Amino acid sequence: VGIGGDTEGGLKPKRLEMDGRTPEGIYRIFRFYSLDADKKSESYTELDRLNGYYLTAKLGYGLIGKPGKDAGKNVFGPRFYGIDYPAASDVAIYLEALEKGQIPADKKANFAKIGSGIAIHGTNDEASVGKTFGSGCIRLRNEEIVKLDPFMSPGMPVVIFP
């Protein structure tokens, strides 16, 4: 398993959405979606909906090793375990960086947000496993994430450290 981080100079804390960094700390599984669930269940319909989005390289979702090539659809694979990021410690890191002027802003002085939606999930791009990618999620090969089913449950702690 690899986590997203700054490849130049070592890992750095996740500060904002789309920085490619995986948050470090103790979290909990709060969402579980599966393509093997009943097709009428929320678990199935939500992951099917998420996998239906077409993600573009222009927005930071390109295929690894293929510059400019869109990740496309089915980027989350057959499982999606959402974690409860941001935690209070993540908010503190963000606010400190904001205070120090380390959070970028657009031309209208709208600062980048802390982000949310971090998950452990499958992928449609095996080359991306263990590599820095857009949001900072943890990606596993599809056959590996399915094997986690017996060990995952809502509220289960997830400890993320390099």
Image: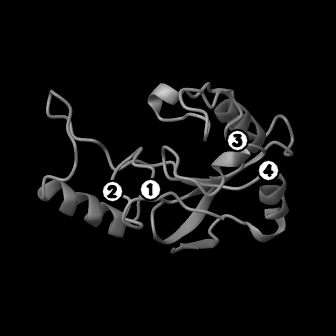
Q: Which mark is residue 125?
A: 3
158 relative to 69, above or below: below
**What secondary structure is found at the residue carrying circle 4?**
helix
**Of the pair 13 and 30, the residue shown nearer to us:** 13
Could you tell me how far apart the alpha carbons at marks 4 and 1 are, in whole angstroms?
21 Å
The answer to whether any part of residue 81 appears in the image is no
Q: Which mark is residue 89?
A: none
Q: Position of residue 82 (x, y in %)?
A: 60, 54
The answer to whether any part of residue 48 appears in the image is yes
Q: Are marks 3 and 4 in contact (CB under 8 Å)?
A: no
**What secondary structure is found at the residue carrying circle 2?**
loop
Tell me where residue 42 sits by quadrant: top right
Q: Which residue is mark 4?
A: 142
Q: Residue at x 60, y 59 (%)?
A: 30
Q: The residue under label 1 is which amino acid type? A: Arg
Could you tell me how far apart the alpha carbons at marks 2 and 4 are, in whole angstroms?
28 Å
Q: Position of residue 21 (x, y in %)?
A: 44, 56
Q: Are marks 3 and 2 in contact (CB under 8 Å)?
A: no
Tell me where residue 144 sits by quadrant: bottom right
Q: Earlier in the sequence, mark 3 or mark 2?
A: 2
**What secondary structure is found at the residue carrying circle 3?**
loop
Q: Residue at x 70, y 41 (%)?
A: 125
Crowd band around label 4 with a 10 angstrom C-alpha radius: few (<14), some (14–19), many (20+): some
Q: Are marks 1 and 2 in contact (CB under 8 Å)?
A: yes
Q: Which mark is residue 21?
A: 1
The mark closer to the camera, 1 or 2, is: 1
Could you tell me how far apart the alpha carbons at marks 1 and 2 are, in whole angstroms?
8 Å
Q: Earlier in the sequence, mark 1 or mark 3?
A: 1
Q: Which residue is mark 2?
A: 15
Could you tell me how far apart the alpha carbons at marks 1 and 3 are, in whole angstroms?
18 Å
Q: Earlier in the sequence, mark 1 or mark 2?
A: 2
Could you tell me how far apart the alpha carbons at marks 3 and 4 are, in whole angstroms?
10 Å
